[in-house]
Image (cartoon, rainbow, N blue to C red):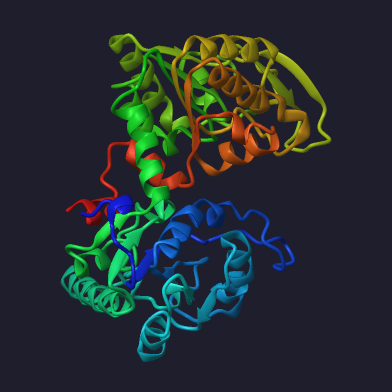
Amino acid sequence: MQKFADYNFTGKRVLVRVDFNVPFDKSDSFITDNSRIAKSVPTIQHIASHGGRVVLLSHMGRPKGKVDPKLSLGRIVQTVAALVGKHVNFCDDCIGEKAVEATKKLQNGEILLLENVRFHAEDEGKVKQKEGESDADYQVRKQAMKDAQLAFAAQLAECGDCFVNDAFGAAHRAHASTSFIASYFPNDKMFGLLMEAELEALSHVVEHPQHPLLAIMGGAKVSDKILLIENLLERVDKLIIGGGMTYTFVRAMGGHTGNSLCEEDRLDVARSILEKAKAKGVELLLPVDAVNADKFDPEAQCCSSPVDATPDGWMGLDIGKESRKLFHSKIMESKTILWNGPMGVFEMKPFSEGTFAVAEALADATANGAYTLVGGGDSVAALKVAGCENRVSYVSTGGGAMLEYLEGKKLPGVEAILH
């Protein structure tokens, strides 16, 4: 593995795997959030300014191995050019003679964006067992697809002289363009600046945290966060649980949850987590009060109650005022803080205050010297709406990748560069 800052890019075709899977508005006409592109701009600019010939690889959406004009990366060329501050060339394929020739025509400092890698099914390499198919036949098809992935990665590799992985958002995927491709550059592969920053931020929380270490977990379901919570219990001093999954814990402790979201089949899991936290000396905090609604609607009638005494016919959709005060005090006591998941249905204005209060508390803690890491699509979106995006230490670009890293899993896109 090479070190990005020390590598001599001059005159080389630099194959850079980025994550340009940006969202469009409902009319499918405008990019609603270009931050995934913006985050890789420093990597692109560094290579170009140091004489490299930048060749960008990315996926967009889920075309399932078929060409879909609505998912063409040609649609974002002008946005990439505007953010990078340079002209960006485009090729309507990512493999084959046409793509290779386009890379060879590049001059030092020039940039080329290749077409969506997922227009080829071999990138993802998905194989599902067919109804009635024997395990033996299924394994044969899986191996055939893996061979096809390697062949596809080899074709992608023909477009570059070295490989830079800067797509943290796709690092948890064992795809041809994220992990298989690295094997074709055994002595010329490295992380980009974004990947380096992401891994450094995660290491700061997981490997070298300043204590007290606090994790704030929100979201709807305990089942989505079991592995994450269990792994965090080995590391954190305090754990705040909010969002919809609060009520599975409340029910597990004998509380009344009304019509609130509750995973009845996860009550034993919730009790186990509570017991593990107690055994390990981790302070596990749940909301003490809630804002309830009589229906899941922004125009719903609202009331407040203790979190374990939700009235019949009502559902908890946000944390209450006392919970906000409690969580703020715990956040301000901490030196390292990880936040993943909202405290309620923040997309609906009547139920956004709890999540925004946590965002403000993290900003206050950061200003007070704490290290704060926020990741996960909903958390990041809430942080932006609250106006706190630039007031925390680090905002991760990879929700799924970040969660799998924190669960203790190896990320294929990372391992492929390291080994």
**Residue 60 drawn above or below residue 214:** below
**Residue 99 drawn above or below residue 283:** below
Near-viewer residue (255 or 288):
288
Relative horizontal placement of residue 5, taking residue 246 as reference (left or right): left
Residue drawn 48% across the image and 53% down it: 42
Residue drawn 33% across the image and 40% down it: 405
Residue drawn 38% across the image and 64% down it: 16
- Is residue 253 visible in the rendered image? The answer is yes
Corner quadrant of residue 99: bottom left
Pick out the residue farthest to the bottom: 97
On the image, the x and y values in percent for residue 185 come to 21, 67
On the image, the x and y values in percent for residue 364 come to 60, 18
Corner quadrant of residue 160: bottom left
Near-viewer residue (256 or 182):
182
Near-viewer residue (343 or 138):
343
- Is residue 64 visible in the rendered image? The answer is no
On the image, the x and y values in percent for residue 285 come to 49, 14
Total labels: the figure holds 0
Residue drawn 51% across the image and 41% down it: 376
Corner quadrant of residue 58: bottom left
Relative horizontal placement of residue 77, taking residue 183 as reference (left or right): right
